[in-house]
Amino acid sequence: MLDVPRDADADTIKKAYRRLARQLHPDVNPDPATQDRFKEVSAAYEVLSDPQKRAAYDRGGDPFGGFGGGAGAQGQGFSFTDIMDAFFGGQGGAAGGGRGPKSRTRRGQDALIRLDVDLAEAAFGASRELKVDTAVVCSTCHGDGAAPGSRPVPCETCRGAGEVAHVQRSFLGEVRTLRPCAACRGFGTIIPDPCRECAGDGRVRSRRTLTIKVPAGVDTGTRVQLSEQGEVGPGGGPPGDLYVEVQVADHPVFTRHGNDLHCAVTVPMTAAALGTTLTLPTLEADVEQGADSGVETSFELDIEAGTQSGASRTLRGRGVPGLRGGRGDLVVNVAVETPGRLDPRQEELLRELAALRGEESPTGQVKAASRSVFGRLFGH
Ligand SMILES: [Zn+2]
Ligand SMILES: [Zn+2]
């Protein structure tokens, strides 16, 4: 418009305007086309010479203030946005940004709820019904907050702009600032007859029952995202998301370490020495299965002859399925139980065994304490 670079300083702008004004001024050149051009140039200078208006323009807003993009209302009889469109490829007021009344409609907040599941549900997935309390769109006013038969009306204080100018005189000159309009709280409209159901908020709280699919492999702290099931926004704005945070209850047998499961079995000293076969439950046994489902509810574990207390056995693929596929292991820690309270016959047999093994007066092997045995035993 003024034929100056985008980042021109105040002095350059002033000089450019004076040069153009000399050519276009009505006293010099009264024809209508030239006068339109003079109005445009003057308007452009008005914006660029005023730091606040220039800042608004630089931000992409409408420097004539407050009517939102496209409205372009001001007194010169032409639209400021048209000038900007013509000279800056539609990036002026047409972008619709900047200041002006704020919308009553906003996106709702995300919501977070906790869901307690047992270990088998976490491992194999589950479908659960959950009651959630969130804001939903008010069915009486459909979100606009106005009682049926009424409508929001433009605010008279700010004439719909949502903001009002405050002018202060100081020794530096007039300082003009825009503040949100107190009468309409910046919305630019007033709801004269608020909806009685939602008190004008456009939304009400409601309890719903949702069916939540818990994917296999979740752990404590895993969040399942349910898009747009969160709080509806003010003014009937789009809902946020609902996050369901999983909390896995402790299991009486299995302790979870990532996708591995740990458990401990105790075997008598004689069984550890001679070897045996144990029947252990699977985690699948916790899930109700049909009789012919083919799901293993138990499995056999061979304890080899000579198994030591603290030994552990790792059973591949008997742990928890991973969220991204694969499956963890089951680690079985073996504790050997020493018999107590021997009757005379048992004691006699053990003494005979000790004599046969030359263990009547053992010295004991002293070595560094093994944290690993302790750790394995207790699953730390
Ligand atoms: Zn309502
Ligand atoms: Zn207002």
Image: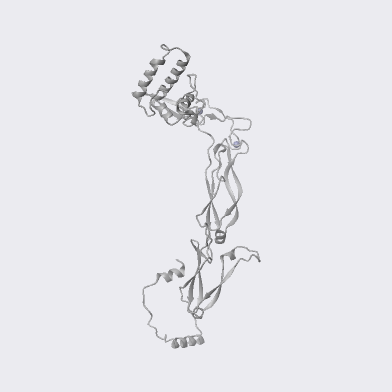
Q: Quadrant of the C terminus?
A: bottom left
- Does residue 100 lie above or below 287 as drawn? above
Going 40% across and 70% down the picture, which residue do you hit? 371
Q: Nearer the viewer, residue 300 or 133?
A: 300
Q: Quadrant of residue 144?
A: top right
Residue 318 in the image: state x and y as whole percent.
53, 66
Res 22 quadrant in image:
top left
Q: Residue at left 65%, top 64%?
A: 290
Instruction: Report whether residue 170 is seen.
Output: no
For residue 194, above or below residue 31: below
Taking depth in this image into account, of 192 and 189 the one nearest to the observer is 189
Instruction: Give me the residue at 46% from left, 70% from top.
Output: 377
Give the image quadrant in which the ligand numbered 1 is located.
top right
Residue 223 visible in rendering: yes
| Percent position of residue 46, x then y | 41, 22
- The picture places residue 226, in percent across and down from the top left corner, at 56, 48
- Which is more toward the observer, 107 or 10? 10
Query: How many tags in the picture?
Result: 0
252 lies above or below 87: below
Which quadrant of the view contains residue 115? Answer: bottom right
Q: Quadrant of the N terminus?
A: top left
Up-down: is 176 above or below 131? Answer: above
| Residue 92 spot, x, y in % from top left | 46, 28
Side of 12 where 270 appears, left or right: right
Relative depth, front residue between 143 and 39: 39
